[in-house]
Image (cartoon, rainbow, N blue to C red):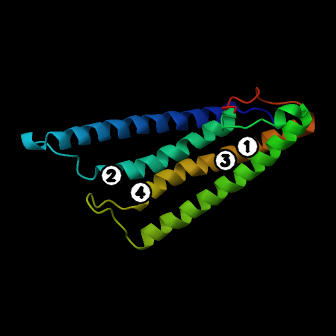
Amino acid sequence: MNRSPVMERLARALAIVGGLVLVFITLLTVVSITGRAFVRHGLGPIPGDFELVEALTAFAVFSFLPWCQVTRSHATVDVFTSFFSDRVNRVIDLVTEILMTVIIVLIAWRLWYGMWDKIRYNEVTFILQFPVWWGFAAAMVASAIAVVISFYMLGVRIGEVRSGRSAFAPTLGAVH
């Protein structure tokens, strides 16, 4: 399977959105903590800050998975694999891609199930009273994109093993 600029742009866009969400979470936390520090002066924390951080963090975490898949940026440990041939390393990459795809599909499936569970029981957050399933839905969108990207990358890895050459540059991940 050839490289797909569409998949790469989708993964990059989702990672950028996830990064913006993390910036928002950081600002929200700073403002809330600052408000707590000046409670004697009439300020206070942002109501429901923990609820917002919790829901948004779930989305942010899943929003980076597709980019890590596409750029091969997951941490790797190549103590033994550096001694293997390129062909053996491509097979190892394929096996790890299969495992990663299975794990991402499993997580997405359980998120889907959990989201519907929260919808069914009309569970809401304590302070803001917004439905808990909203956080699950946001994470579900990101995890669904992660599933699509993971299957795409699985196809890429199969193509690499068949053709005997890598479709991407060598690993960009952290090497230990």
User: Camera-side residue: 140 or 68?
Assistant: 68
Q: Residue at x 87, y 32 (%)?
A: 83
Q: Mark 3 highlights which residue?
A: 148
Query: Which numbered disc flags the more N-terminal residue, 4 or 2?
Result: 2
How would you rate the neighbour count of disc 2 (Cα within 10 Å): few for under 14, some for 14-19, many for 20 or more?
some
For the C terminus, give its image quadrant.
top right
Measured Cα–Cα span from mark 4 to mark 2: 15 Å
Residue 67 placement (x, y as % from top left): 61, 36
Label 3 vs 2, first from the N-terminus:
2
Task: Tell me the mark number nearer the camera, choosing from 2 and 1.
Answer: 2
Q: Secondary structure at mark 2?
A: helix
Q: Which residue is mark 1?
A: 152
Disc 1 crowd rating (10 Å Cα; few below 14, some 14-19, many 20+) is many
Label 3 residue SS: helix
From the viewer's perspective, tell me whether residue 51 is left or right of residue 94: left
Please say if the residues under marks 3 and 2 sit with CB atoms less than 8 Å apart: no
Residue for badge 2: 50
Specify the amino acid type for callout 4: Trp
Compute the Cα span from label 3 to label 2. 31 Å
Extreme residue toward the bottom, this view: 121
Residue occupied by mark 4? 134
Q: In the image as oriented, which residue stretches furthest toward the left?
A: 41
Seen as rendered, the residue at the extreme top is 169
Q: Is there CB contact under 8 Å for labels 3 and 1?
A: yes
Give the CA distance from mark 2 to mark 1: 35 Å
- Left or right position of 137 against 51: right
Image quarter hosting the N terminus: top right
